[in-house]
Amino acid sequence: MKKYTMLFSLFLLAPALLFGQAKKAVKSNDKLDKLKAEAVASVEANKVLAQQINDKLFSFAELGFQEEESFKYLTELLEKEGFTVKTGISGIPSAWIATWGSGKPLIAVGSDIDCIPKASQKPGVAYKDPIVEGAPGHGEGHNSGQALNIVAVLAVKKLMEREKIPGTLMLWPGVAEELVGTKAFYVRDGYFKDVDACIFTHVGNNLGVSWGDNGNNGLVSVRFNFEGQAAHAAGAPWRGRSALDAVELMNIGWNFRREHLELTQRSHYVISDGGDQPNVVPSKAAVWYYFRERTYPKIKKLFETGVKIAEGAAMMTDTKFTYEILGSAWPVHTNKVMAAAAYDNIKKVGLPTWSEEDQLLARASQIELQAPKTEGLAMKLDSMGMPTSSAPVVMMGGQAMTPMGGGSDDIADISWSLPTIVLRYPSNIPGLPGHHWANAISMATPIAHKGIVYGAKAEAMTLLDLLLKPELIKESWAYYKDEQTKDIKYEPLISPKEQPAIYLNKKIMAEFKPKLEKFYYDPSKYKTYLEQLGITYPTVRDDQREAVKKVIEKEKEKEKSSASKVGSSRSE
C-alpha cells in the first residue's frame, strides 16, 4: 500500500517539478540573453580599439614567420589587459598564446596574422596603387581577425569577472598561414590538448559559419633540394652536373603526370633557387611544391608521386636530392553543434549597414577586377554552410569521383583535434581574386571596421553560450567523437623530426621592412589609417564612377521589368 501511495504522490508532484525546471530554464535563458546584450554593447563601445588593431596590423604588412611588429604589438596589448602570454611556442619567434581566467571550459580563439607577397595597396582606393611598390600587403585580410577576437574576448572577460563565471580564454595567432606552416606543429606539440572548444575567425564577405567538410583540399608543402657539380658553363660544361636541370626535369615530369591525376588534385610550384649566374653550372637548385588533395590518403599518395618524379629527375642528371616538409594541412571539418549555436547568434546580429561610400568602393573595385557580379557588398545573410560530402558523387571513366577541391587552411589540423568552427565576417569585397592586391582595398576602411565589429558581436555571444551551457560543449564533443572521427582518425602529415621553417620570408622582409616602417599607423596622431595616408574615402576614378552609375541604372531597369511582369501575371 505504501508503494502505491508513494507512486501516486510522485504522480501528483510531477507537473510541479516539471514546471519548476521549466521556470528555472527560462530564468537561465533570460540571464544569458541579458549577458549577451551587454557583450554586444561592450563590443560596440570598443569599436575604436577594433579599428586601431586592424589598421595597425594592416600597416605592418608582414609575411609569414616574420610577423615581428604584429607579435610585439599584440602581446603587449594583451599583457596590459591582464593576460598571461607565453611566447615562442613550437620554436616560432612570432607565435604566442595568451590566457586569462581559470578552470574549465578552456576555449581557444584564434585568427591568422600574415600577409601576401607583392600585395601592397592603399586602402580605400579602387584601383592598383601600392603603399610601397613590390612590398607585401594584406591581400587576404589577415590583419582583421585578431582585432575581432580581442574586442570580443575583452567584452566576455569583463562579464566573467563581474559574474564570477568559471573558464579560461585562450587567444592565439595563426602564424604563416599562407605557408600552412604552424598549426600542425601547435597540435603536435600539445598546445591544444586540454582545449574544450575552438572558435577561429577568418575574413570573408558575409557573416557566416558552416559545418562538416567544406569541400576544400588538404595539402603538404615540400621543398625539393637538388645538388650537382659546378663547372664553367662555357669552358667545361661536360664537367658539370646541373641541379637546375634536375629541377626543370622534375617540373616537366610533374606537368606531364598532371593529365593522369584525379581532378580533385591541385598542385603548384615555384623555383626557389635556380642557381647563381648563367656562366656557372648550378651545383644547387630547389623547387617548392604544394600537393593538394581531398583526403589524407590522397595527399600522401600525391606527395609520394612527387618524390618518385624527383628521383627520376636526379637519375637523369646524375645529381642528388633531398626534400623537406615546410608545412601541411588536413582538409577542414568543422563542428555541427557549435556552428548551429553560432548561427543562431549571427541571425540576431545581422549584417552591417553599409554607406553609399562603402558600396561605391565595392562596386568600383568589382568592375576594375572584372568580378563575376558587381552588386557591391552583401545585403542579406548567407544560410549556414552545409557539408560537402567526400563520398563519390559522379562516375567518370568508370571511377567514382569526389567533389572538386580548392584551397587549404591549416586550421583543419586543429579542427581534427577538437571541436572547432570558423566564423567568417564581412570585411572584404565579394568577387575579388583572393591572394591579390585588390583584396587589400577594403581592409583598412569602414567596410573592414564594420565587419569586424559585427563579427565580434556574434563571437562574444557564442563564447557566452560555450561558457554558460555545459551541454553545448558536451554535445559538440559527441559530434566530434561519434560522427566526425568515427571512421577517420587524424594522422599528422608532419613527423616528429620536422621543424617550422622560420627562415622563410626573411630576405623579403629585410628588403621591405625599412620602406614600410615610415608608413606604420600611429593612432596617437590619426583617427584612422586612411587619415594618416591622406586618402579620400573612397578614391574612385571618374570612369569607375560612371561605370557604377550605369550598373545601378541597369539594375533598376531590371527591377522595373520584373515588377511589371509580376503585375501583368496577376491581372491575367
Image: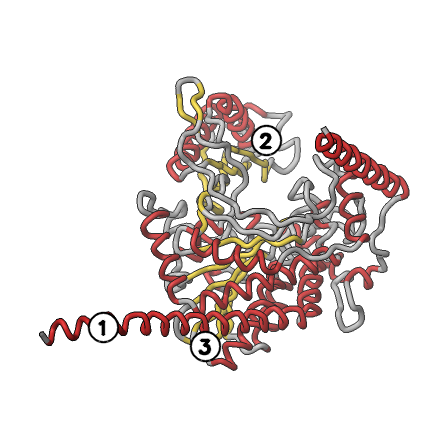
- Placement of 463 over or under 366, stated as above or below: below
Instruction: Answer with mark 2 or mark 1, whichever residue precedes in sequence.
Output: 1
Q: Is residue 160 visible?
A: yes
Return the residue at label 3.
165
> What separation in Å lies between label 2 and label 1 (alpha carbons)?
92 Å
Q: Position of residue 560 (x, y in %)?
A: 80, 36
Return the residue at label 1.
10
Side (left or right) of 135 relative to 420: right
Q: Position of residue 267 (x, y in %)?
A: 52, 33
Label 2 environment density (alpha carbons within 10 Å; few <14, some 14–19, many ≥20): many
Label 1 element class = helix
Instruction: Answer with mark 3 or mark 2, whichever residue precedes in sequence.
Output: 3
Q: Which amino acid does label 3 sit on?
A: Ile
Q: Where is residue 465 in the image (x, y as percent from the top left)?
A: 47, 65
On residue 366, which mark appears? none
Label 3 element class = loop
Label 1 environment density (alpha carbons within 10 Å; few <14, some 14–19, many ≥20): few
Instruction: Answer with mark 1 or mark 3, whichever residue precedes in sequence.
Output: 1
- Between residues 6 and 331, which one lies in front from this camera angle? 6
Which image quarter holds the C terminus? top right
Residue at 69% of width from left, 49% of height from top? Answer: 379
